[in-house]
Image (tube, grey):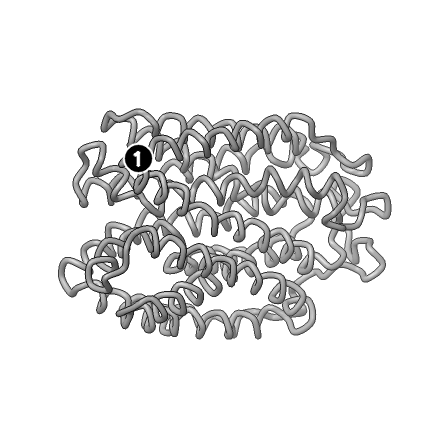
Amino acid sequence: MLALAFVAMLASGPGQSFLIAVFVDDILADAGITRTVFSLLYGAATVVSASAMAVLGPAADRFGLRAVWVVVSVGLAVACGLASLVSGVVLALVALSLLRAFGQGSFPLVATLLVTRSFRGRRGQAMAVASFGITTSSIVLPPLTVALIVALGWEDAYRVLGLAVLALVLPLAVFLHAERLEAAERDGRSAVRRGPRALRSSRRLPRLTVPTLRARRLLVVLAAPPLLMTAAIFHATALLADKGLSFTEAGAALSLVGIASAAGLVGAGAVADRISSRRLLSAMVAILAAGMLVLVLPQAPAGYLGFFLIGLSAGVFGVAGGVVWPRTYGLAEIGRIQGTSFAVQIAAAAAGPLPLALSEAAFGSFEPALAALAGYGLLALAVALRWREPRAVRFGENAR
């Protein structure tokens, strides 16, 4: 199950901002779409993805992850094929919507559900291992895709990605056996306990109702990484060009995000089961806000350092998202809970590219928008520092 979760994270690459960013400038040139319009399309497509997550989570609870795996694999391959045909606004919107829904949203949700259903103790460590799939994808795919674009053109590069999903990812559905997944009991308690030292669900854990103050606070914090990361990564090539970096050097900087993310995953995975959610969340948004502030600086080294810090925060986020929700609300209907979380996070990602595009159009610079987004990161940090854990949660027991 952990290996499949890793592959699901890896397979999300074609729908992630770090890979779409590699194609942006070529699509703008060939399709005759302005950067601002494309950012609006990207935002609308990401809203579609958010809506899909609200449906996919409950569908995973009802139909099982094998069926979801098949649908998502085929959908992502079709999305890559349509992306290779983009020639105008309408097709760009459809292709982006499918890429974001089946790539950026669905596969990470599948991976998270695999981990949360399969692990009680050491869930943070398991989530870190699974999230290495996205890290690996962000390290390997940007430079590899740049090479494909140079050799074949951006259209054929997208077709190669789609064929790879069909040939390498889709067949793995056969290994998803429902009986291996430990689903939660419908009355809100864990169906299986792996010993007294395991971090366990309890009736005292609150149910998820988004209007509650606790849920709103958690969503404010967990929305910060997709909002800020998507903003910076989506415009990475243009942003780094302003700092004097070439297209190839920008690809290397995006790869650096993956390397830093690996470090964040290792660190967060090692401590997540031993520390409170407040410390985990606070570290995540503090690093992220620092990265955005560094990107405001015009020097080339600031580009590398800023994306390194963003990647480091992404690694912590990869663990936090899979740990804090089940720790706070238990495992009952975890698909619905995680689906709601992913929907809000993806909606936040939808808004990310637009501020930078508007800033560049109005001021000829990305810096004002970067500073404003860093301000949101600081707000999320203030909220995280006030987070309080439910009484039922115990730390460190499963790590002894």
Q: Quadrant of residue 32?
A: bottom left
Identify the residue at the far left of this view: 151
Whether residue 242 sits left or right of residue 105 in the image: it is left
Residue 252 left/right relative to 59: left
Label 1 crowd (10 A; few <14 / some 14-19 / many >=20): few
Quarter of the figure with the C terminus: top right
Element type at marker 1? Answer: helix
Residue 226 location, x and y as percent? 49, 45
Q: Which residue is mark 1?
A: 363
The quarter of the picture where the N terminus appears is bottom right
Residue 359: image x %, image y %? 35, 38
Q: Is residue 1 visible?
A: no
Residue at 26 percent of width and 26 percent of height? 298
Give the vertical position of 264 relative to 230 (above or below): above
Where 309 falls versus 187 (above or below)?
above
**Taking 383 as reference, is 256 above or below it?**
below
> In screen coordinates, is 217 left or right of 265?
right
Closer-to-camera residue (361/85):
361
Please tell me how many numbered marks the rendered image carries. 1
At 24% from the left and 50% from the top, the residue drawn is 143
Question: Which amino acid, by three-letter code, is at mark 1?
Answer: Phe
Answer yes or no: is residue 204 visible.
Answer: yes
Q: Position of residue 164 (x, y in %)?
A: 33, 69
* Residue for point 50% across, 29% down: 375
Instruction: Identify the residue at horizontal 52%, vertical 53% (top origin).
Output: 346
Q: Nearer the viewer, residue 200 or 153?
A: 153
